[in-house]
Image (tube, rainbow, N blue to C red):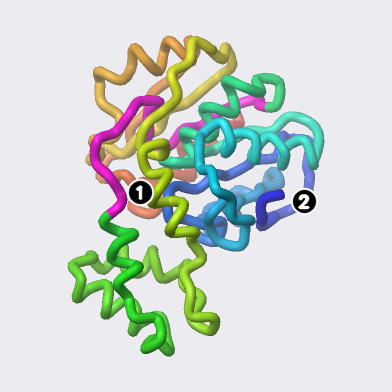
Amino acid sequence: MLNMILHGTPTDRPPLLIAHGLYGSARNWGVIAKRLSDSRQVIALDMRNHGESPWADSHSYPDLAEDLADVIKHFGGVFDVLGHSMGGKAAIMLALSHPDLIRRLVIADIAPVPYSHSQLPFIEKMRAVDLDAVTRKSEASAQLGALGVEPALQSFFTQSLDVADKRWRYNLDVLASEMPKIMSFPDTTAHWDGPALFLTGAESDYVLPEHRDRIRALFPKARFAKIPGAGHWLHADKPREFEANLRAYLDA
C-alpha cells in the first residue's frame, strides 16, 4: 500500500485522491489538500519509488494505476481523482483499467502521449550531491545550484531529502532505468466515458492542440481549461486559481 496523508474526514461527497508528478510527494500537495478538505476527505499519496512509499523494480503506468486502485479499494466506494504530470498519466491509466472506481477525473498538465524530453539529467545531478557533506537542506540546495539546477527546483527536490539518513527519498536507480516508460504512455484502445477535465498551464507546452484528438479518443467527454500565467507546475504557480478550477469542476 502506498504511503498516504489524509486531510479531513469523510463527507457525503466522494473523497479526492491526489497523485503527484515525478520527483514529487504527498507533502508537496499539503496546502491545496488541506484547503479542499473543508468539503470532502482528501488523500494525497506518495507514488511508488517516491517519499515514504515502497520501492519496486517497475515504474510502468499499469503498475502505478494498480497502486492507485489498491488505495481506492482499501477505502471502498468511488473516488474523484486528480493526477499531475506522471501522476496524471497514472490516473489516466486507472480510469481506463478500473472505470468503476472513479466518479470525476482531473488531469493536470499532461497528455496520454510520449514525450521526448528526458528527466534523467535531474537524477544525475541529485546523484552528484555529496550527501556526506550535507547537514541541512540549504547545503544540498547550494550544491544543486552549483550544478545548474534553478532555485525553484532546488527547493522542490530537497523536500524529498532525508538529511539525517543522508539519502534521497527517491529510488533513483529504478526511476533512471524506467525513464523511457515514464516519458511514454502505453498504446491502448480503451476509453472512459466519465467526466474528465484536462487542466493545463497557459505557459506550459505539455498539452498541445495536436494532443486533443488522442485525449478525446480515450475520453469522449473530456473538457479542457487553462490557467493564465501558470506553467507545468500550475498548482504551485497559481494555487488559488488551481483550487478554484478544481472546486468548480468537482462540485458541479
In front of the other: label 1 or label 2?
1
Q: Which residue is mark 2?
A: 9
Q: Return the mark for residue 233.
A: 1
Query: At which x and y percent is residue 71?
Result: 71, 42
Query: At which x and y percent is residue 59?
Result: 51, 43
Q: Amino acid at mark 1?
A: Trp
Residue density around tag 1, few if under 14, some if 14–19, many if 20 or more, within 10 Å:
some
Residue drawn at x 38%, y 54% is 236
Query: At which x and y percent is residue 55?
Result: 59, 55
Q: Is residue 113 above or below residue 3?
A: above
Residue drawn at x 71%, y 20% is 100
Residue 38 appears in the picture as rendered? no
Q: Secondary structure at mark 1?
A: loop
Between the C-alphas of marks 1 and 2, the distance is 27 Å
Q: Amino acid at mark 2?
A: Thr
Residue 5 belongs to the span the image colors magenta = no
> Which quadrant would the C terminus be assigned to in this image?
top right
